[in-house]
Structure formats: C-alpha cells, structure tokens
Image: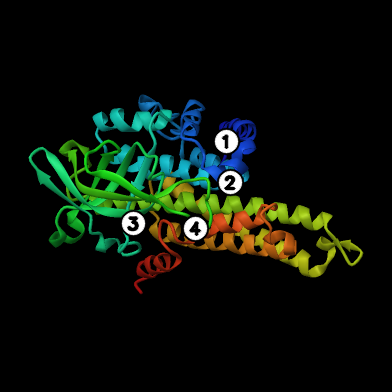
Amino acid sequence: MYFSDAHEELRLHIRRFLEKEVRPHLAEWEQTLFPDSIFKRFGEMGLLGLRYDPEYGGQGGDYFSAIVLEEEMARAGCGGLGMAIAVQTEMATPPLNKFGTPEQKRKWLAPAISGDSIAAIAMTEPDAGSDLANIQTIARKDGNEWVINGRKIFITNGARASWTLLVTKGDRERGHKGYNLILVEKTSPGFSVTRTLEKLGMHSSDTAELLFEDCRVPLDNLIGEEGEGFKQLMWELQGERLIAACGAVAGAQKTFEYAMDYAKERRAFGKPIAEHQVIKHKLVDMATKVNMIRAFVYECATRWDQGDYPVREISQAKLMATQIAVEVADDAIQILGGHGYMREFPVEKAWRDARLARIGAGTDEIMKEIIAKTYGL
C-alpha cells in the first residue's frame, strides 16, 4: 500500500551499503564517534537528498523514500549515526528547502545533499527546552549584518557542523512574530563550540553546547521572511516528530525480532523460553504494539506527503511510537534477563538509544499538551 517497487529497490540499495560500509564499524564508533567523512559517503550514495529537487542534487523522491532510509538505519542498529543523518536530511535542511531562496539552496542545501557540508539545527537553550517561547538568543540588525548573542545546548552534529540553522528572537516584545531562523556558518566570527556532552545513549554522535558572542552573519542568512521564524519552526517540528516516530517503530521491530529469536534458542526448565506462556504472551504484546503504531504512522506519513498538516495525528504518532519503542526495549531486556543488561547484547543499547526520542522534538508531556489543544481542552 505504501511502498512501490522503486522504494524496495532503494531499500536494498541502502541495506547493502549499510551492511558493507557501516555496520562493521558501529561498535568502534560507539567508543570514538563516527568520522565526518561518513556524510560524504552517504552523499555519494545519493542518500542525503532522497526527496529533494534534482536541481540541487536531490533524488526527487517522496516522503516514503525518507522513511525507507530511516527504517534501514534502524534495522542496521545505527543509533547515533542514524540520528545524525536524520538531523541532516529531515531537520536542518527541510526549512532551508521550503523557505530558502534559490541562491541559499545552491549555497547551503546542495553541499548538504552531496555530503560536502554537515548541518545542525539549534533550538534548545539551557533555560528554554520545552518552553520555546522563552528562547533568549537574540539577533539584532547592525548595518548589513545580524549580531547574535545567546547559547544553545543538546545540539546534535553541533561540534562538527559546517552550518547551523539557528532559532533566534529579533524582538522579545513581538511574541511569536519576533522569531527568525538564521543560518550560521562554522567560520562566523563570534561563534564557538564550548563543550561536547556525554550522553546515556547515541554514543557515536556528537552533542554540543554552542555559544554566540556578538556573532556576525550577513542579513542574507535569514531563512524566509523576517518575523516568520516561529511558524517555520512549528512546521519543521512536525516533520521532525514524524521521522522520529518512523525510526522508533523500525527500532522497536528490530528489537522485538531479536528478543523473539533469542527466546526460541534460550532454554529454561527443559524447553525454549518462547514456549513458556509468560514469554510467549510478552512477545505477542510487543509485536501487536509495533504493528498497530506502524499502521498509524504510515497513515500520518501519507497525509504529510500529500501536503496535509495533521498536527494532532503526528503528535499522537510521535507520543505512542516513542513510548512503545522504549517499552519493547525494556521487555526485551526482561526476556534476556541478565544478558539483556550486558553491553555484549544489543538490547541494552536499544533501550538507551530509544529513550532519547521521548524527549527530543517535544517531550511526551508537550505532545499531550498539543493533542489536548486540538480537542479544545
């Protein structure tokens, strides 16, 4: 219903690439971070612009092309690398593609699609995470430049990014009309990476704190119309939440399959533990949850691909998919017992990596607030 023959050919193309060039290095990258050069390799394979215009180096595909990539990254157990690639393809570049000028796309989008540049998006601040209205990063005009002051935290790709799509305020008094999205290049004077952060999961990717001290960038680095940044950000977040839901479902499927295979081989009390009712029923519950939320996520993706803007449904999908991914990983740990808690088995990593998605792009609690508003609550 959702995937054509072309999608399945793409899936095999991605799967072969990941099996040959990525999976053999994942354990090492968990200890050392993946190299910047992997972005260039993804670009050479045509995987950083699957649904972007061929004019800028993209493949001209639909949203389900992006889902195929997300699902295959999860299937391969890419974790932090998968998140970093998703930031490049589905978080930092979509606003540039939708709201940017042709000149901006040629300058920044095309190199991001080819893998010659690495992108990040910077929203969260030390005192403004879920409360985006409390953002303190200010961008004021001075001649033909923006002068930016502020700090951002928890920024994926932040330490290695060639450019960052920065959420700023121009005027605190204008409320939602005072926001701007401004592209800041790594070489901009006044920009610095103050530290990289150690995390519970997603160990192969870098997460950084960024500082802007009288940082100067040209006025032309504004994306879209001045004062429209909040609307642009709200649009971007829908896509970010939807791709997070897709990745969560795919990750949960992989974890379930591993737990089921383990249960068929592991013996206790004279038979495989999969034959014990308590384990059998747990596996059934895991599979049922994954299949149900997958159907809902694909429905949301279809509407998004057709140009719809289903805020309620995307929020519900993101809420449930990420919760189920954590539940499935937790159940898998329980099925494996002591082995599930050991790093030599993949389910503990699956739990650590999955847990982030219930926080990033809007916490569970924020998703519930958004959903409540759509019902007039």
Q: Three-letter amino acid code at disc 4?
A: Leu
Residue beneath disc 2: 74
Give me the residue at 22% from left, 42% from top. Answer: 224
Is 85 drawn above or below residue 176 in the view shown? above
Q: Amino acid at mark 3?
A: Thr
Dot 2 amino acid type: Ala
Q: For the residue carrying disc 3, how many other residues have a C-alpha within 10 Å: few (<14), some (14-19), or many (20+)?
A: many
Q: Earlier in the sequence, mark 2 or mark 1?
A: 1
Element on which disc 3 rests = loop
Image quadrant where residue 373 sits:
bottom left
The residue that disc 4 covers is 356
Specify the quadrant that holds the N terminus: top right
Q: Is residue 295 visible?
A: no
User: Could you tell whether 238 is left or right of 73 in the image?
Assistant: left
Taking the image as shown, residue 178 lies to the left or right of residue 306, namely left
Q: What residue does disc 3 label? A: 124
In the picture provided, is 140 more to the left or to the right than 207? left
Q: Which residue is mark 1?
A: 4
Percent coordinates x, y for residue 130 in the rendering = 35, 63
Residue 149 locus on image (x, y percent): 20, 51
Chain-order first, disc 4 or disc 2: 2
Residue 127 location, x and y as percent?
Answer: 30, 64
**Total marks in image:** 4
Colour scheme used in the picture? rainbow
Question: In the figure, 18 relative to 352: above or below?
Answer: above
Look at discs 2 and 1 and give the one toward the viewer: 2
Q: Nearer the viewer, mark 1 or mark 3?
A: 3
Q: Earlier in the sequence, mark 1 or mark 3?
A: 1
